[in-house]
Image (cartoon, rainbow, N blue to C red):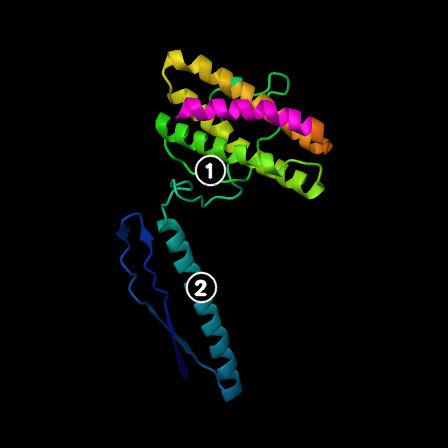
């Protein structure tokens, strides 16, 4: 007769500001009997592996059941694929397409709450970043591809931030904010198309229109 001891798994995981107590160590006793030495070793090995697998699966299932962390806790996402946010102010979309061509999915935008001031600050910062694109404009293919990707990334942030900003604004402030956002997003779509043509004249003209509105956004969000 041979005896194998298989220790259980212990884990202490932090959730929020509290710590879970470590689970007590469990010992699994496996006894096997066989008439010959070879048969005894083979039987004990098989039983030991099967018992260890069962114990690990039970611990995994117990840990999963005890994990009550939400999929979106405000700091990181634990679900996949990444959820696509929905906007409340549908007027921000293009009237013809019902969406915006520059919006990207699969990127994480930190939840900064519903505060008007917080979204105004991020809008101003993003507008500042896009004003720095002027030096990269040109007919170089590599630069044009970079500009389009960067424009789409930053404009996606502004798309969702304007939605939150308008929802948090007073009723009398919403129409002018909606007008500003709509003009900005229309210019983003024209600039995106212009960058795809690799035509310096068209790109410069489109960016000049966008630049004026970006400066208006910075002044409004100051």
Left or right: where 199 falls relative to 111: right
Q: Main secondary structure of the magenta part?
A: helix
Residue occupying the point 42% across, 25% down:
164
User: Would residue 86 be counted in the magenta stretch?
Assistant: no
Residue identifier under label 1: 109
Magenta segment range? 202-222
Q: Residue furthest top?
A: 172
Question: Badge 2, how many Cα within 10 Å: few under 14, some, many 20+?
Answer: few
Structural distance between the alpha carbons of marks 1 and 2: 41 Å
Q: Residue furthest bottom?
A: 37
* Secondary element at tag 1: loop
Q: Are marks 1 and 2 in contact (CB under 8 Å)?
A: no
User: Would residue 214 be counted in the magenta stretch?
Assistant: yes
Residue identifier under label 2: 54
N-term-proximal mark, 1 vs 2: 2
Q: Indicate which disc residue 209 carries.
A: none
The quarter of the picture where the N terminus appears is bottom left
Residue occupying the point 41% across, 83% down:
2
> Considering depth in this image, is 198 or 45 the residue closer to the camera?
198
Q: Position of residue 94 (x, y in %)?
A: 59, 20
Q: Position of residue 125 (x, y in %)?
A: 45, 34
Q: Position of residue 56 (x, y in %)?
A: 43, 63
> Considering depth in this image, is 114 or 22 the residue closer to the camera?
114
Is residue 115 visible from the viewing direction of this image?
Answer: no
Q: Is residue 53 above or below residue 203?
A: below
Left or right: where 181 falls relative to 173: right
């Amino acid at each position: 007769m041979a005896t194998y001891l298989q220790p259980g798994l212990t884990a202490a995981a932090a959730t929020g500001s509290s710590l879970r107590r470590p689970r007590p160590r469990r010992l699994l006793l496996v006894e096997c009997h066989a008439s010959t030495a070879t048969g005894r070793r083979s039987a004990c090995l098989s039983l030991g592996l099967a018992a260890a697998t069962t114990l690990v699966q039970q611990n995994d299932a117990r840990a999963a059941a005890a994990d009550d962390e939400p999929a979106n806790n405000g700091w990181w996402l634990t679900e996949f694929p990444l959820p696509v946010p929905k906007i409340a102010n549908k007027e921000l979309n293009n009237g013809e397409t019902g969406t915006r061509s520059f919006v990207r999915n699969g990127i994480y935008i930190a939840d900064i709450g519903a505060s008007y001031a917080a979204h105004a600050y991020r809008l101003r910062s993003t507008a500042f970043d896009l004003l720095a694109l002027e030096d990269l404009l040109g007919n170089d293919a590599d630069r044009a591809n970079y500009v389009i990707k960067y424009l789409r990334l930053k404009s996606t942030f502004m798309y969702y931030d304007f939605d939150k900003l308008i929802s948090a604004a007073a009723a009398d402030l919403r129409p002018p904010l909606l007008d500003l956002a709509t003009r900005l997003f229309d210019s983003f779509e024209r600039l995106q198309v212009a960058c795809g043509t690799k035509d310096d004249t068209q790109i410069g003209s489109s960016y000049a229109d966008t630049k004026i509105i970006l400066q208006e956004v910075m002044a409004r969000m100051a």
